[in-house]
């Protein structure tokens, strides 16, 4: 980052001396006021719950322009990556900063392919869960448990360990996600097949069974690969910030990524795709398109506690570019599968149209986000609703790893330790219980 010509001066109305802070500028996007010395110089903290105006780090991985609705991975627009690259190229880009040539891509993909199997003892670990456990509960456990199986790559400060654990996590997430699914449905696990693509392998491990041959549908394979690309990274979102904060204590990479899986599960974050599809199904049951107005009124009534899931975003105050690409995938997949008249897709598009013309949403700059259409695509390709967030976690693993690696690779990083505004009880003495 570069020192800007501009400076920030803090003045107090109580006559305390002014304080000057440096302003830094990046490649693109907002400048930052460096307040690291604020507490030492004033004895005061800044106050920013939810981090609405706080840059927690410097990063060169992903850039979002929320006003324009733009998303860049290492400078490449998401639209170009989703159209011209596959997920393996995107993983390479996020991890190493440049797109691979054919040889680099082949070497990287082969490395991932050769790490897709998990320690066979993990199959016993899964058996400890109830069969009806939510897949994200199983996945949170399985990812954290990787630190109990891969002891030779747990030192987060060892660059070689970080490299090996990165490949292991990217390679094994599809296997773990498929294990959670097969465990839920009571079917035997399917081992990964080295001749299949990354997306093809997940489809095989989820939907093949030992009794018959399974052929990967190329349309579904391509749609799934694009879903992975669109979900791969997204700047300092809640789960990425969780991974950074967790990793800053020096814990092992598997534990830090497991923390990200746990955070992503929330319906305000990665759990929104599951919630958005359930919302569409509820409107469908209510009566479909004719009931959209009634539902929108419930959303606008604050007391209802109902939100339009898949809409709104902390950063995007314009259309999420991923939602546009996801809508395109919806159309491609549904027509390829002869489901052009899928009622939920039609309902989603009608709901979007009505919401985008409604002042409540326009005023608050609420647009569809990545989760609004992703559930419809996944449902069309046969993925059950309960698995949507697990698929999101699978795709976001590479982003979490890249962000964690960037932080740990910075020799100046410190353990994250925010402060607070204390409004609790000042010191008081314990009274014996007999007198309370
Ligand atoms: C993801 O951060 C990321 O990058 C996340 C993500 C990623 O790739 O990592 O993009 C993935 O998490 C996408 C978001 C998925 N979540 C949802 O779709 C859940 C529904 N959306 C909302 O919960 C909400 O929009 C958030 C959580 C996404 C953003 O919330 P903010 O930034 O804290 O905004 P806010 O809650 O302060 O909302 C501002 C106003 C409020 O109304 P007022 O108090 O001003 O009257 O807009 C309203 C909110 O009530 N509002 C909504 C709404 N989202 C915001 N009203 C109805 N429906 C919604 N979805």
Image (cartoon, grey):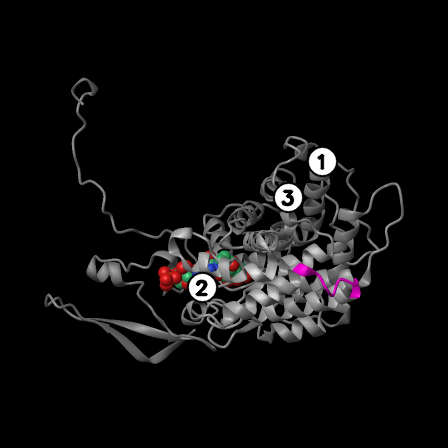
Which quadrant is home to the C terminus?
A: top left
Residues under numbered marks 3 and 2 in contact, where contact means CB atoms less than 8 Å apart: no
Report helix, strand or loop for mark 2: loop
Frontmost residue, 11 versus 200: 200
Marks 1/3: CA distance? Answer: 20 Å
Q: Nearer the viewer, mark 1 or mark 3?
A: 1
Q: Main secondary structure of the magenta part?
A: loop
Write down the residue under mark 2. 314
Q: Residue at x 49, y 67 (%)?
A: 59
Which stretch appears magenta? 336-343
In the image, is residue 59 above or below residue 131? below
User: In this figure, what is the number of numbered marks?
Assistant: 3
Q: Give the class, few, some or many, for how many residues have Cα within 10 Å of label 3's Cα (few <14, many ≥20).
A: few
Residue 66: x, y in percent?
Answer: 47, 72
On the picture, is 387 further left or further right than 107?
left
Residue at the spot of label 3: 152
Disc 3 to disc 2, C-alpha distance = 39 Å
Regarding residue 410, the answer to whether it shows in the image is no
Query: Image point 57% across, 63% down: which residue?
Result: 370
Residue nearest the viewer, comparing 327 with 63 = 327
Number of other residues with Cα within 10 Å of mark 2, as a class: few under 14, some 14 to 19, many 20 or more: few
Q: Does mark 2 have its CB less than 8 Å from ligand 1? A: yes
- Residue 364 visible in rendering: yes
- Please provide percent x and percent y for residue 404: 53, 56
């Amino acid at each position: 980052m570069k020192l800007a010509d501009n400076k920030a001066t803090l003045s107090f109305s109580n006559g305390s001396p002014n304080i000057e802070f440096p302003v830094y500028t990046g490649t693109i996007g907002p400048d930052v006021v460096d307040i690291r010395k604020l507490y030492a110089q004033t004895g005061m903290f800044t106050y920013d719950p939810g981090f609405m105006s706080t840059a927690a780090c410097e990063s060169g991985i992903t850039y979002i322009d929320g006003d324009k609705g733009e998303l860049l991975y290492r400078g490449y627009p998401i639209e170009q990556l989703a159209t011209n690259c596959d997920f393996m190229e995107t993983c390479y880009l996020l991890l190493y900063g440049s797109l691979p040539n054919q040889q680099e891509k082949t070497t990287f993909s082969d490395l991932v392919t050769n790490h897709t199997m998990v320690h066979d003892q993990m199959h016993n670990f899964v058996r400890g869960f109830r069969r009806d456990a939510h897949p994200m509960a199983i996945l949170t456990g399985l990812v954290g448990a990787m630190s109990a199986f891969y002891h030779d790559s747990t030192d987060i400060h060892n660059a070689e360990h970080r490299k090996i654990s990165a490949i292991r996590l990217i390679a094994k997430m599809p296997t773990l996600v498929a294990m959670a699914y097969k465990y839920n449905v009571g079917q035997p696990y399917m081992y990964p097949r080295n001749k299949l693509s990354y997306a093809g392998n997940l489809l095989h491990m989820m939907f093949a069974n030992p009794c018959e041959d399974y052929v990967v549908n190329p349309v579904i394979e391509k749609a799934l690969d694009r879903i992975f690309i669109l979900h791969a990274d997204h700047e300092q979102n809640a789960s990425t910030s969780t991974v950074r904060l967790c990793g800053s204590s020096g814990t092992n990479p598997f534990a830090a990524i497991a923390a990200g899986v746990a955070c992503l599960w929330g319906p305000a974050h990665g759990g929104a795709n599951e919630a958005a599809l359930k919302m569409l199904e509820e409107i469908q049951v209510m009566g479909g398109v004719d009931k959209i107005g009634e539902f929108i009124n419930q959303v606008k009534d604050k007391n209802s506690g109902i939100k339009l899931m898949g809409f709104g975003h902390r950063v995007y105050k314009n259309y999420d570019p991923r939602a546009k690409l996801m809508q395109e995938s919806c159309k491609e997949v549904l027509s390829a599968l002869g489901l052009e008249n899928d009622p939920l897709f039609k309902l989603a598009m009608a709901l979007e149209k009505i919401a985008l013309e409604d002042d409540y949403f326009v005023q608050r700059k609420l647009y569809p986000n990545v989760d609004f259409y992703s559930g419809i695509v996944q449902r069309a390709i046969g993925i059950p609703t309960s698995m949507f967030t697990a698929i999101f976690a699978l795709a976001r693993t590479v982003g979490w790893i890249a962000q964690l690696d960037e932080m740990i690779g910075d020799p100046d990083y410190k353990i994250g330790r925010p402060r607070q505004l204390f409004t609790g009880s000042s010191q008081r003495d314990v009274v014996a219980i007999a007198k309370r």
